[in-house]
Image (cartoon, grey):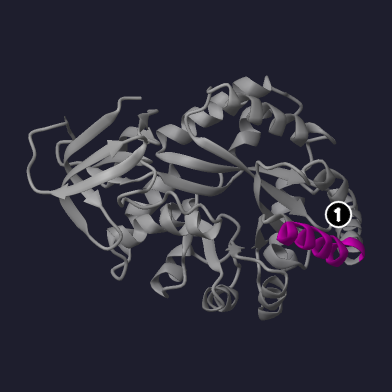
Amino acid sequence: MPAETVLRNASIVLDDEIVNGSLRISGGRIAEIATGISSLGEDLEGDYLIPGLVELHTDHLEGHYSPRPGVRWNTVAAIQAHDAQIATSGITTVFDCLRMGSDEDGGFVAGEMRLLADALKAAQADGRLRAEHFIHLRCEVSAPDVLTEFDAFRDDKQVRLASLMDHAPGQRQFQTMDQYTLYYKTKRGMSDAEFKAYVAKRKEQSDRYAARHRRAISEHCRGAGVTLASHDDATLAHVDEAIEQGVRLAEFPTSIEAARASHEAGLSVLMGAPNVVRGSSHSGNIAAKDLAEAGILDVLSSDYIPFSLMHAAFALADKVEAISLPQAIATVSATPARTVGLDDRGKIETGRRADLVRVRLDNGIPVVRTVWRAGERVA
């Protein structure tokens, strides 16, 4: 890494304004921001210079590790492929989701998530990765074995975020059987008898395990300093429960009422960037754009399409009159960083880590041209 790097002729996206000028990087941090014309440094040709994106919830690693049902790819190769797509999408900090507890998606056996986590740690230590990776544990609290899976991560310092979720029928994302039937019976081709038995089993598991597991995991995370997220909150009672358990991040609320109550209580409300790009939820829940227009959308997540994070930020600024580009960029940088306690990044200001992305708009679609992490070019 060079001792100093100067980037000039940039449209620099700050907290509350966009300035034309230059930026100096020293020792991996932002040393100076200057307005006006400069003849020194790399010419960014008027392109936007924005903070590196911070991704809190992506399931994308799973698809590289298991690209087809029953297929397992080399763990390090899978992680490198995932990391390359993350970095070239402008994401410099990523929380990779690992599932805890057997749920209705199935497909993985006990120990596989620990295997992936160990490979991730090794790849990062070896300098193989472009982005900085942390772990987000997706805890299916209605699963009988969720605590067994979770136990393997209790002392793992890579774990910085854990979400509490229950995908049983009649719960949260699937409050109506119409949604659940479409998502599981229709898409998976279950017979009536198979679906009836499946629903009964999942409801029984939720009734037996969910409250106990939710309480145990939240107690551990609070003591260990791991940020807690609730998932698919639908009612005011869900929000009250989240607040009581120390949740700081409300992921994918499924009703306006739950989103508003979460936001007003100081929780960061997260919605999917693909929801913004598509204009609707793929599962028939509320549209992220509606929350943005109501002023109660705080964080975006790429979920299953890494580049959607960058795309959605610019789309928000373009489609929602009340949201400026700096405000839209904050939903993918400053606010997610603050939510999980990463106060050294997420903004372009002196003293912050030089996680930066050069972006150009082409027919309304952002093009990532260069990415720096801690001052080093990584893409």
Label 1's element? helix
Question: Percent from the top left, x then y, of residue 228?
Answer: 66, 60
Residue 356 lies in quadrant: top left
Identify whether 96 is placed above or below 226. above
Pointer 1 residue: 192
What are the residue bounds of the magenta stretch?
Answer: 208-223
Whether residue 271 sits left or right of residue 64 in the image: it is: left
Q: Quadrant of residue 286?
A: bottom right
Q: Residue 165: tell me if it is visible.
A: no
Q: Position of residue 80 (x, y in %)?
A: 55, 24
From what the image shows, is residue 103 above or below residue 328? Answer: above
Going by the image, does 338 lie left or right of 61?
A: left
Q: Where's the N terminus, which quadrant?
A: top left
**Is residue 348 or residue 198 the one in the foreground?**
348
At 65% from the left and 66% from the top, the residue drawn is 247
Whether residue 334 sits left or right of residue 364 in the image: it is: right
Q: Is residue 155 above or below residue 314?
A: above
Task: Please tell me whether residue 90 belongs to the stretch shown in magenta.
Answer: no
The residue lying at 21 percent from left, 36 percent from top is 7
Q: Is residue 334 visible?
A: yes
When asked about the image quadrant of residue 140, the answer is bottom right
Count of marks placed on residues: 1
- Residue plotted at (53% across, 23% down): 127
Tell me residue 158's x, y (percent): 65, 41
Q: Nearer the viewer, residue 239 or 117?
A: 117
User: Which residue is located at x 44 percent, y 48 percent?
Assistant: 309
Residue type pointed to by label 1? Asp
Q: Position of residue 344 (x, y in %)?
A: 44, 49
